[in-house]
Image (tube, rainbow, N blue to C red):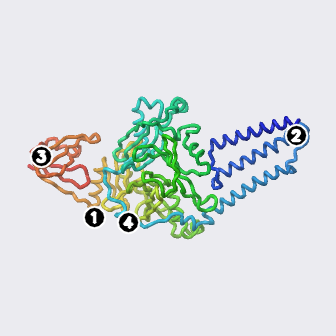
């Protein structure tokens, strides 16, 4: 073969190699960073392809043309390439082992600093009007139902599966952007961008499709360079990305919050968060911040999974890796599952803490701040969340309802699990409150206020709690009564003569109120913080 043909062949092969490398990088988006496992695979792939193109294929072609049998062992450049790949693999394996908890148990155990917390002081007593009632599955049902009512959008867009829980202006909400319904819908709509996002109030279940003056142009649903992952990778090629969360700021502007991994132990170990990227979903403009400089409105810097992993290292590696595997002395671990609490405009991950032997009781629970990583442990013995879920389901076993993972509340200074009970179609039918310390104390109600009222009665009966709210009464003549409809239920708001309080009477629970009128002499029985009163006429 002539030299010109050989040169042309090599140019073609180099072009093919460059195209393959570019496509791999464009689709897989590995970080150009020695701490990235994907980067090592990327380099090894390139070296193997170079060896195949410039050494293996020419030897095979020579055999086909000249009949000379290829001797791969005596090809020095090929041997060098194989040795290089082998060296990379050895370094990768050694680096992986030296970065593991097996040889760094003490360093892993110190990745998280845990403080002792005071439950009654740190967690304010619950306001039932602010209880976040929705989990992600319920929010998805509401979001899809709302989207189905938007005739002008539903054929082109659907709600993305983000449904991030955040605090928005002091209110727990779930937010999720719209996304294109299909690649064809992307092709016809990407020029205009995504026009709205879904916002769901977790306490009131109010679902709002927020339409934007300026469309979302960077998202997970985009293709090519406007895909949010690709957009961030091209701006920050050396950063190793962790989770990507959709959030909105206090003005309702949509953002993507991308945490950047930092490795504290060896090549691949001790992952934490070193920096945070804030990307405006409308403009694509980015802010690159250290964790300490992240603004207050950002809720999710550390994922719940990373925080629970931190605590598992902290709880299981106190006496080294061998003790964790064999002796398991003083080893504690988080329970199966977590939920969120909103405290002082921050989002905290809640999970129980149990012994490594996996019994059905907790020795306490932890709260972990998703923005700052601050962690507090509360020493409380009681039932694990799964046991509480079983207790709640047992109260309605004839209905076959399933309990959601519980939310931790402070009711009368008592750690209390709050759960929703769903039917087979995923709709919430009842609510339950389960005492953490005595999980046989279970209150059920069709409404949250009814459930809390029943729970308060159970606490009183069992003489539990330092701040149990007692039933109170009021007598007087009706000065004014107004009929209203609240969430599909009829209520009467009543004012008594000479009394400045406004009393709420649920007609469903007090049918006799329909025969009452202004001027009647009545007695009202109520509990502070519980919406509905019990009313009777005084003859």
Left or right? Give the position of 364 relative to 106. Answer: left
Q: Position of residue 43 (x, y in %)?
A: 70, 49
In this rendering, does residue 401 appear at all?
Answer: no
Label 4 environment density (alpha carbons within 10 Å; few <14, some 14–19, many ≥20): few
Report the residue marked by disc 3.
479
Label 1 environment density (alpha carbons within 10 Å; few <14, some 14–19, many ≥20): few
Q: Position of residue 219 (x, y in %)?
A: 52, 40
Report the residue marked by disc 2.
62
Label 2 environment density (alpha carbons within 10 Å; few <14, some 14–19, many ≥20): some
Q: Position of residue 134 (x, y in %)?
A: 39, 47
Q: Residue at x 74, y 38 (%)?
A: 15
Asked whether the beta carbons under mark 1 and mark 2 sit within 8 Å of each other, the answer is no
Report the residue marked by disc 1.
463
Looking at the rendered structure, the secondary structure element under dot 2 is helix
Q: Position of residue 369 (x, y in %)?
A: 45, 58
Looking at the rendered structure, the secondary structure element under dot 1 is loop
* Inter-mark Cα distance, 1 to 4: 22 Å
Q: Which comes sooner in the sequence, label 2 or label 3?
A: 2
Q: Which comes sooner in the sequence, label 1 or label 4?
A: 4
Label 3 environment density (alpha carbons within 10 Å; few <14, some 14–19, many ≥20): some
Report the residue marked by disc 4.
118
Q: Is residue 103 above or below residue 472?
A: below
Left or right? Give the position of 525 relative to 396. Answer: left
Q: Is residue 149 above or below residue 204?
A: above
Quarter residue 344 falls in: bottom left
Q: Which comes sooner in the sequence, label 2 or label 4?
A: 2
């Amino acid at each position: 073969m002539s030299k010109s043909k050989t040169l042309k062949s090599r140019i073609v092969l180099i072009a093919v190699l460059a195209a393959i490398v570019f496509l791999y990088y464009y689709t897989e988006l590995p970080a150009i960073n020695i701490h990235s496992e994907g980067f090592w695979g990327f380099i090894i792939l390139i070296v193997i392809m170079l060896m195949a193109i410039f050494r293996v294929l020419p030897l095979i072609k020579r055999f086909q043309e000249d009949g000379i049998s290829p001797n791969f062992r005596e090809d020095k450049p090929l041997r060098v390439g194989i040795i290089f790949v082998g060296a990379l693999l050895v370094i990768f394996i050694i680096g992986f082992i030296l970065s593991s908890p097996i040889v760094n148990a003490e360093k892993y155990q110190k990745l998280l600093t845990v403080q002792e917390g005071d439950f009654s002081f740190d967690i304010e007593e619950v306001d039932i009007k602010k209880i976040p009632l929705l989990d992600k599955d319920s929010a998805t049902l509401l979001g899809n139902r709302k989207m189905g009512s938007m005739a002008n959008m539903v054929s082109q867009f659907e709600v993305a599966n983000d449904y991030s829980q955040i605090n928005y202006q002091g209110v727990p909400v779930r937010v999720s952007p719209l996304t294109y319904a299909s690649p064809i819908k992307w092709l016809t709509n990407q020029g205009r961008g995504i026009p709205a996002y879904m916002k769901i109030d977790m306490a009131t279940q109010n679902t709002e499709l927020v339409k934007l003056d300026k469309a979302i142009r960077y998202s997970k649903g985009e293709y090519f360079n406007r895909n949010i992952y690709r957009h961030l990778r091209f701006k920050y090629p050396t950063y190793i990305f962790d989770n990507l969360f959709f959030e909105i700021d206090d003005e309702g502007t949509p953002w993507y919050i991308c945490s950047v991994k930092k490795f504290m132990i060896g090549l691949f170990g001790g992952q934490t968060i070193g920096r945070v990227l804030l990307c405006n979903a409308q403009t694509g403009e980015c802010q690159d911040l250290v964790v300490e400089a992240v603004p207050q409105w950002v809720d999710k810097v550390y994922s719940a999974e990373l925080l629970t992993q931190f605590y598992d290292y902290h709880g299981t590696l106190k006496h080294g890796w061998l003790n964790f595997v064999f002796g398991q002395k003083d080893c504690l671990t988080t329970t199966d599952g977590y939920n969120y609490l909103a405290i002082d405009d921050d989002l905290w991950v809640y999970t129980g803490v149990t012994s490594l032997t996996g019994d059905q009781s907790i020795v306490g629970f932890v709260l972990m701040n998703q923005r700052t990583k601050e962690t507090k442990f509360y020493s409380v013995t009681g039932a694990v969340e799964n046991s509480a879920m079983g207790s709640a389901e047992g109260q309605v076993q004839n209905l076959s309802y399933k309990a959601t993972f519980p939310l931790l509340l402070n009711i009368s200074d008592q750690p209390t699990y709050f759960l929703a009970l769903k039917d087979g179609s995923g709709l919430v039918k009842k609510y339950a409150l389960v005492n953490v310390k005595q999980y046989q104390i279970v209150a059920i109600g069709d409404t949250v206020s009814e459930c809390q009222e029943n729970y308060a009665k159970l606490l009183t009966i069992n003489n539990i709690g330092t701040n149990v709210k007692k039933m109170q009464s009021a007598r007087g003549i009706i000065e004014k009564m107004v009929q209203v409809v609240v969430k599909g239920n009829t209520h009467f708001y009543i004012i008594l003569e000479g009394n400045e309080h406004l009393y709420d009477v649920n007609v469903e629970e007090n049918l006799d109120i329909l025969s009452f009128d202004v001027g009647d002499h009545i007695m009202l029985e109520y509990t502070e913080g519980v919406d509905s009163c019990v009313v009777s006429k005084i003859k």
